[in-house]
Image (cartoon, grey):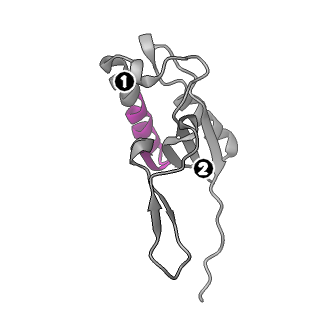
Amino acid sequence: MKYMLLKTYGPAAHCPIPIEQWSMDEIAAHIDFQRLLSAELARSGELVDARGLAGPDEARIVSSDGRSAPMVTDGPFAETKEFLAGYWIVDVESPERAVEIAAQASAAPGPGGKPIGEYIEVRAIMSAPVTDA
């Protein structure tokens, strides 16, 4: 069973301080924690992929009618708190294991090294049989 664990920009349950106001050492510790979690999941064979994403200011919205050149704009976007910051894709034995990994990710350190209680969305990755067209 594959799941996507989604990280978003915004306040966390136990840390109202935006990451932009953290010290460089606190940011480095937070990123190191995420790298270590990814390495642990890779060793267990559960990691499919994990990536951090560029900030919302680098995002683009693309729409197309399928006939003419696509429209590419730099907005409108949802509120900053709703932007996706990164993700893990895991292949696990149960939904409970996906939640367990999300809980571990949620406890990433923030200011003072304390767990921030980051909100991690857990979503099953749907699959459909591939058919010959």
Residue 14 lies in magenta, yes or no? no
Q: Is residue 43 visible?
A: no
Return the residue found at the far bottom.
133
Whether residue 103 appears in this view of the structure is yes
Say what secondary structure mark 1 lies in.
helix
- Residue located 45% across and 18% down the image: 110
Query: Depth-wise, is mark 2 or mark 1 nearer the camera?
Result: 1
Quarter of the figure that contains the C terminus: bottom right
Q: Amino acid at mark 1?
A: Ile
Marks 2/1: CA–CA distance? 26 Å
Asked which secondary structure carries label 2, the reply is: strand
Q: Position of residue 49 (x, y in %)?
A: 45, 51
Nearer to the camera, 26 or 131: 26
Residue for badge 2: 3
Instruction: Give left or right: position of 53 versus 11.
Output: left
- Residue 111 horizontal/vertical position (percent): 44, 14
How many C-alpha atoms fall within 10 Å of the one at disc 2: few (<14), some, or many (≥20)? Answer: many
Between residue 65 and residue 42, name the one nearer to us: 65
**In this view, 38 is above or below 29:** below
Question: Amino acid under label 2?
Answer: Tyr
Q: Is residue 28 above or below residue 101?
A: above
Give the labeled residue for mark 1.
27
Q: Is residue 41 left or right of residue 25?
A: right
Task: Find residue 96 and report its horizontal and vertical position in percent.
Answer: 68, 39
For mark 1, does the 10 Å Cα neighbourhood hold few (<14), some (14 to 19), or many (20 or more) residues?
some
Q: Tell me the residue at 36%/24% (across/down).
A: 27
Q: Which residues are magenta?
A: 33-53
